[in-house]
Amino acid sequence: MDRRVLTLCLAAAWMLTANAFPHSFLGQYKGLPYRDIRYHDGPQKVPGRVMCAYYDLGGEGVAYHDTDPQNRGSGGLNPADGSYLNEFRIHEGVDTSYTKFDRTPVPIDDNPFDKTVPPRDLLYVGWTEPGEWFNMTVNAAHAGTYGADFLYTSNRGGTVSIDVNGKDATGPLQVSTTYDPADPVAWRQWHHWNLASQLFKVRFRKGRNVLTVHILTGGNMNLAYFDFKRVH
């Protein structure tokens, strides 16, 4: 093929791709990967641990939807005191908190009713309600299918679903309750941590992807992280 013709064909193909891309979810999405004074690595990395509390920047209706504009963790349960953890994303609607160890006289997140002991000072999304959602931008090292372990608590059980790049990738996922009638402290039912192994599998394209976590039923779950491993 004549080089000039080949160049024109390649240019035409590029124009078709460029014109189509803005109409895709990734082309239209205005959210940005989370960054702050402590976390500034850009998109979260897959394979690896994807933190729910590092949901995207962009605000209500872009990066997340929450049923009320107040963060009931930062500045609420955790009084504003100038500390990073107590004031984490304090002015955003998604409710965030962190695991608390060595509290007396009643242990909180390092309690004997944990199914698995979470990391200390681990940030998480909580106070979830049906209809809420949030986005997380990730960067996949390779295209492929990835399985996710899920660290969470759930007083009553419920269902969630996961979108990848604007499309439902899992359907409803059952989240088992972590309620334990043996715990005599009623409010601590929200602090029984569990690790759901391979809760779901999704396929990522290489590079940038956007995950959307939807709370479908149940609510009142604490969502800490998804630990992604490539399965094939």
Image: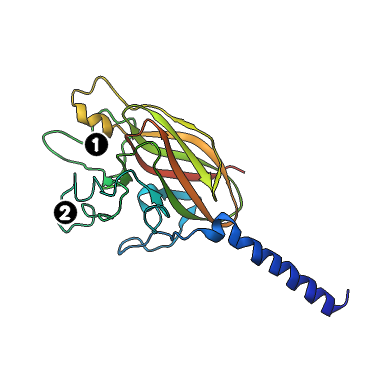
User: Callout 1: 10 Å neighbours few (<14), some, many (20+)?
Assistant: many
User: Callout 2: 10 Å neighbours few (<14), some, many (20+)?
Assistant: some
Which residue sits furthest bottom?
4
The amino acid pointed to by label 2 is Ala
Point out residue 23 in the picture as x, y percentages from the top left corner.
60, 58
Name the mark on residue 90.
Answer: none
**Lateral position of residue 177 relative to residue 88, left or right:** right
The residue where tag 2 is placed is: 80
Q: Nearer the viewer, mark 1 or mark 2?
A: 2
The numbered mark, 1 or 2, whose residue comes first in the sequence reads 2
Point out residue 167 in the picture as x, y percentages from the top left corner.
56, 45
Going 78% across and 76% down the picture, which residue do you hit? 7
Front position in the image: 157 or 129: 129
Q: Secondary structure at mark 2?
A: loop
Going 62% across and 44% down the picture, which residue do you hit? 232
Point out residue 229 in the picture as x, y percentages from the top left corner.
52, 45
Point out residue 101 in the picture as x, y percentages from the top left corner.
21, 41
The residue where tag 1 is placed is: 110
Which residue sits furthest left?
105
Quarter of the view holding residue 68: top left
Which residue sits furthest right?
1
The amino acid pointed to by label 1 is Asp
Q: Is residue 4 above or below residue 40?
A: below
